[in-house]
Image: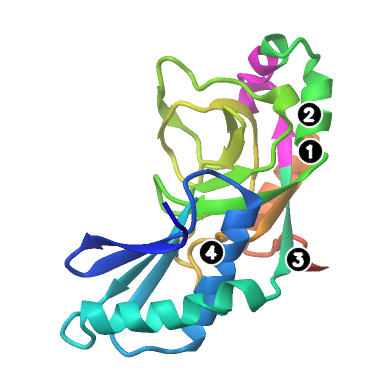
Amino acid sequence: MQYPFIKIVSDTALAVVFGNEISREIITQIRAFDEAFNEEQIDGIYETVPTYCALTIHYDPGQILYGELCEKIRALLAVAHHAARISIVVMEIPVLYGGEYGPDLQKVADHNGLSPEEVIRIHSSREYLIYMLGFTPGFSYMGGMDKAIATPRLKTPRVLIPAGSVGIAGEQTGIYPIDSPGGWNLIGRTPVKLYDANRDTPILLDAGMHVKFIPVDETEYLRIKGRVEAGRYHCHTYVKGDE
C-alpha cells in the first residue's frame, strides 16, 4: 500500500493516512500537513485531528463535497508535508514520583530489574513527543520512552485514577488529565491541571508538543499545587528549535 492515501471515516469525515506504525517521521509528516492544510482556510472544514498514523479531517458536506476536498488534499500532499519546518515546543511538567502518588513505581522497577531511583532518572531524562490526545479530554499519548522502563498495562484496570497521574503502558508514557478509570502503571503525579474547563484553553497539552518531566519532592509538589489552585502557576515552556 502506498502512503499517504485518503480513506473515508464517515459521511462528514475523512482521514489522510501516512503510515501504519508509531514513528517520529510519520507524526512529523502529519503535523506538517496539518499546518499546511489549515493555512489554506478551506470553507466547510471545522476540525482536524492528528492521530498516530493519520490526520482526520471533519467537514461539512453542505459546504464542500468529498470529491472537491480530496482534490485539494492531493494537491497539498504533493509538497506540503515535505517542505514544512516544525518548531519543537517543550513544556516542563513537575512530577512527584512514588509513594501514594506513584503506587506502581516499585512494580515498574521490579519488572525491569531496576531501582525506583533508576526508573525516575530514566523517565525524567528525556523529552517526550505527544503523538495524539484521546481517551479523556487532554489525555496525552507520548512516545520516545526508554525501553529500559517499558512495562505492560495492568491486567485489571483501576476504577479511579486521580487527575495528574503519570503512567506507563508498554513503551508509552502519559498523564491522566481528569479523574478516570485506567490501566496504566502509575509512577507519579503532577499538581498541574491538564484539563480545566474554566481556562480560555481548557486542554493544556497538544499533539506535537514535547514534555519534559521534572522530579520534585512533596514540599515542592504542595507549593506548586497551591499556586495552581490560586491560578498563579505556569509551566516553563520554550521553543527548542526546528526539526
- Stretch of the chain drawn in magenta: 95-108
For the residue marked with disc 2, what is the amino acid? Ile
Q: Are marks 2 and 1 in contact (CB under 8 Å)?
A: yes
Residue closest to the far front: 1
- How far apart in space, not on screen, are marks 2 and 1 (Cα)? 6 Å
Residue type at mark 4? Ile
What residue does disc 3 label?
243
Mark 4 and mark 1 lie on one chain; the one further toward the N terminus is 4
Alpha-carbon distance for marks 3 and 1? 22 Å
Crowdedness near tag 3: few (<14), some (14–19) or many (≥20) residues, C-alpha within 10 Å: few
From where the camera sits, is residue 95 visible? yes
| Cα separation between marks 4 and 3 | 13 Å
Residue 49 is inside the magenta segment: no
Q: Alpha-carbon distance for marks 2 and 3?
A: 27 Å
Residue on which disc 2 sits: 120
- Indicate the amino acid at tag 3: Glu
State the SS at label 3. loop
**Secondary structure under the numbered disc 4 in the rendered image:** helix
Mark 1 — residue? 124
Between disc 2 and disc 4, the foreground one is 4
The residue lying at 64 percent from left, 25 percent from top is 102
Give the crowd class for mark 4: few <14, some 14-19, many >=20 residues within 10 Å: many
Q: Is residue 52 rendered to the left or right of residue 149?
A: left
The mark closer to the camera, 4 or 1, is 4
Q: Residue at x 78, y 18 (%)?
A: 116
> On the image, numbered disc 4 is attached to which residue?
30
> Which mark sits nearer the N-terminus, 2 or 3?
2
Asked if residue 193 shows in the view, the reply is no
Which amino acid type is marked by label 1? Ser
Image: 228 above or below 33: above
